[in-house]
Image: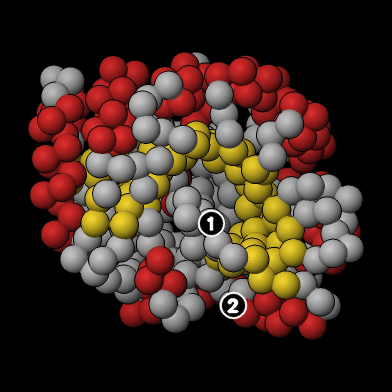
Amino acid sequence: MLNDQFGRQFNYLRLSITDVCNFSCTYCLPNGYQCDTPRNFLNKSEINTLVNAFAQLGTKKVRITGGEPCLRNDVTDIIKQCKNTPGIEKVAITTNGFNLFNKIDEFYNAGLDALNISIDSLNPSMFKLITGHDKLTHILKGIDRAIELGIKDIKINAVLAKQFNKNQLKDFLDWVKLKKVTVRFIELMETGNGAAFFEQNHLSGLSVKTQLLAQGWLQVVRGKLNGPAEEFCHPDFEGRIGLIMPYSKDFCKSCNRLRVSSLGKLHLCLFAEHGIDLRPHLNSQDTPATVNAIQAAMGNKTISHELDKRLTGATTHLAMLGG
């Protein structure tokens, strides 16, 4: 296994394949994608070398993310490529769902195991206000199709923000009453470009947790390949509720994931000061050298992010590295 100096094991890779996004969410890209980085994103050969290197180091799960990964025409090929890598047990994708209904059959047939969709409100007007797009009905059709296909691990990500969705817990609870999905409320995280929005909109997930426990929800034991979310179930509900609270005590204690950007940089934390360039090894298809570079980097992994000190590292917005 890939370990750090604090005894944590890393079996989960979050792989960004583009930093481009076609939505303009208020908390991430309020002015839309600005094209302020090179667009020579990792190609399939480089991704193959990268995923094989991580698999050799004990990685079991790969999440394909962005930006919006479904803007790449070869995303289905990348899903299949990751799934066919020896050692990789689970392939997931995080998407805004803009073309999910049209693509989910392809993704499923390519071997997709898990699906995360960003939906910050179930109110169409509020959804449009947050994202800049009137796509909610179409996205929900894609989720229904994913359920029909038998994809069991479906999660909905909703960022908590005072100005937009602080009072919409009931809407999501009503939805998961009969819908076998997990809705995960994510605390707003500060980024380099989002300090003012953070100050105006940050909400602690603890208030949601208190409400859930008061209503008879029970906390679920976390799986070994799962991220840091706290999940809750209720005997009267088909679906589950999750909470991701990066400002809570010991949030990073169970960290099990590493990130690679769409330009081939290894990020030991979402809020690290810089990435470690793996591109030369990937470009030459040198898997052993990639393995060595990843192992060498682990000595620089810190015990925790420093969001509580308002230190956001090199992350100017969440789309640049996939959140």
Residue 297 percent coordinates (x, y): 15, 51
Q: Is residue 201 visible?
A: yes
Q: Which mark is residue 238?
A: none
Residue at 55%, 62% in the rendered image: 222
Please indicate whether residue 270 sits to the left or right of residue 50 in the image: right
Please, is residue 193 above or below residue 33 in the view?
A: below
Q: Residues within 10 Å of mark 1 (few under 14, many from 20)?
A: few
Q: How many marks?
A: 2
The residue identified by callout 1 is: 223
The quadrant holding residue 272 is: bottom left
Neighbor class of circle 2 (other Cα within 10 Å; few <14, some 14-19, many 20+) is some
Secondary element at image label 2:
loop
Mark 2 → mark 1, Cα distance in angstroms: 24 Å
Colour setting: secondary structure
Q: Earlier in the sequence, mark 2 or mark 1?
A: 2
Q: Given the image, on which type of amino acid does mark 1 rest?
A: Gly
Instruction: Report the side of 276 relative to 23 (left or right).
Output: left
Residue at which label 2 appears:
204
Identified by mark 2, the residue type is: Ser
Which of the pair 217/304 is nearer the observer?
A: 217
Point out residue 312 in the picture as x, y percentages from the top left corner: 33, 65
Label 1: which secondary element = loop
Q: Is residue 175 left or right of residue 152?
A: right
